[in-house]
Amino acid sequence: MDRLKGKVALISGGARGQGAAEARLFVQEGASVVIGDVLDAEAARTAAQINANRRAAAAVHLDVTRAADWRAAVDACGREFGGLDILVNNAGVFNTTGLEDTTEELWDTIVNINQKGVWLGMKFAVPAMRQRGGGSIINISSVAGLTGSTGSTAYHGTKGAVRLLTKAAAVQYGPEKIRVNSVHPGIIATQMIDIIPKEQRERFTSFVPLRREGTADDVARMVLFLASDDASYVTGAEFVVDGGLTAT
Amino acid sequence: MDRLKGKVALISGGARGQGAAEARLFVGEGARVVIGDVLDAETAKTADQINSKAGTRAAMAVHLDVTRAADWRAAVETCTREFGGLDILVNNAGIANSGGVEDTSEEEWDSVINVNQKGVWLGMKFAVPAMRKRGGGSIVNISSIYGIIGSGGSAAYHASKGAVRLLTKSAAVQYAGDKIRVNSVHPGVILTPMVEMASREQLQPVIDMAPMKRVAQPEEVGWCVVFLASDEASFVTGAELVVDGGYTAV
Ligand SMILES: NC(=O)c1ccc[n+]([C@@H]2O[C@H](COP(=O)([O-])OP(=O)(O)OC[C@H]3O[C@@H](n4cnc5c(N)ncnc54)[C@H](O)[C@@H]3O)[C@@H](O)[C@H]2O)c1
Ligand SMILES: NC(=O)c1ccc[n+]([C@@H]2O[C@H](COP(=O)([O-])OP(=O)(O)OC[C@H]3O[C@@H](n4cnc5c(N)ncnc54)[C@H](O)[C@@H]3O)[C@@H](O)[C@H]2O)c1
């Protein structure tokens, strides 16, 4: 119940899906959370649901590609809850387009959100964490950052980038007690993968040793571990939550 | 001498350093090469030197800014027009940066990501249709050991090289059916103009940490690229070749 007691977290893309699951779980474990997303109404609703018991969540407008939005979101953590200890770089967009069919416009959109967004988040969160004497950053990559597939070219590129950006930041900020790790979810049942046809999802699932899709809560519990002091000697590391998919 | 006989290669960033070494080795093994770079004068000089040594017109220089789709289209067209097709692409152009997460500006971030990452994607995008016409091909993407491990700085460089590593695997899966192989190469510290900008004090600790205790010559990477480009590597795709004197093995 108290694994994050007294800590303040900022979660990007927290309006729904995995980010919302993490926000709920973090608050259950005693944290306060700022939820940043471009879906303002959904972010506000998610925060309001969490606040039904105690006021522990605030929603802010955050487009992760904009430095000014990140600055304001980190300011909100300080103003509302007194500081920042945990950053979950969770916002992301998915697409299945292959290498040649990808246009420059689509490429730029995906790279900006999934990759530049993660860097900007760390850039603005680190000074605030430094003031607290340390912190924990969790970057949501994907199994698509570990292995290839027949499409999703730009997505693979960005998730591979997040994996290494994580290790670079872990080396850089280790001496300041800021831990940085990446999480690599497999097939997780959220709105993101509604674009994949049902038969294809069933075929994917048949390759998963645990023979099921993951839930947002499956991932959230891993993120909770990395955010908490239980992971105090864990940094620069990668964690799959994929039912064994990449183990085969 | 004939490991690449009859093949046509396009090498980005081939004016100097590793790209120029690869162009020389490729021609020595019987290939013809188109060298693309933004350093037009140096590119022309490199091509001239190769041609006078070979005694035949086996190398051509083109202006190629890897961030521009139109330049890639023109470079691939040159391969076809001048040498009849395209079999090998070496995505070698790259720029380094030393800034960490906080002290990198958006401008610096964008330029490193555009050259090192978007440039690799664009190169593949325009090379694949030409390779398909030849019934297959080999793409070699130059990542870095900084695409495998972290360091105390170079945030954008790490991100871009990590992206190249996965772009490589994704393209390998996508084009295996077209007999186009795609692999990544991960050099350690290689003595080229990129590294010569660093001071001895910056380099020495890195050298000391590598089991072989020395830097490498560009040809030591070049031979690895020759192997991957050649039919000797006919069952090798989606793989990572580390050339680092053991640096990442410890
Ligand atoms: N669902 C999966 O199977 C799966 C697998 C591996 C990794 N992931 C990753 O998990 C993370 C969470 O995804 P999810 O499954 O919860 O999907 P989701 O689509 O439900 O959630 C993504 C959230 O990010 C937000 N977002 C998108 N662009 C944004 C921007 N520019 N600024 C701020 N927020 C933005 C969306 O509005 C949404 O709320 C993503 O990074 C995704 O790539 C998902
Ligand atoms: N030298 C090392 O220690 C080392 C280590 C690991 C990886 N690498 C990688 O090896 C590759 C070759 O680098 P190098 O060591 O020969 O360095 P280099 O600086 O000598 O060569 C890089 C070449 O890329 C060209 N280039 C830069 N921007 C370009 C653009 N927009 N369009 C076209 N060409 C462009 C440069 O003009 C130059 O000729 C790079 O991708 C680099 O990241 C180098």
Image (cartoon, coloured by chain):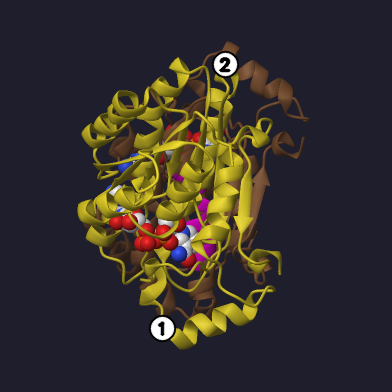
Chain colours: A yellow, B brown
User: In the displayed structure, would residue A1 be above or below residue A172?
Assistant: below
Label number found at residue A197 = 1
| Mark 2 surroundings: few (<14), some (14-19) or many (≥20) residues within 10 A | few
Q: Is label 1 in a helix, a strand or a loop?
A: loop
- Marks 1 and 2: CB-CB under 8 Å? no
Give me the chain letter of mark 1. A
Q: Residue at 45%, 23% (x, y): give it.
A: A129
- Across and down, in percent, residue A237 comes to 63, 41
* Res. B24 in view: no
Q: Residue at 50%, 28% (x, y): give it.
A: A6
Residue B131 sits inside the magenta stretch: no
Identify the amino acid type marked 1.
Answer: Pro
Q: Is label 2 in a helix, a strand or a loop?
A: helix
Tell which residue pokes out farthest to the top in this image. B201
User: In the displayed structure, would residue B105 be above or below residue A159?
Assistant: above
Residue highlighted by disc 2 = B202
User: In the displayed structure, would residue B113 be above or below residue B76?
Assistant: above
Quadrant of the displayed image that contains ligand 2: top left
User: In the displayed structure, would residue A54 be above or below residue B62?
Assistant: above
| Mark 1 surroundings: few (<14), some (14-19) or many (≥20) residues within 10 A | few
Tell if the residue under mark 1 belongs to the same chain as the one under mark 2: no
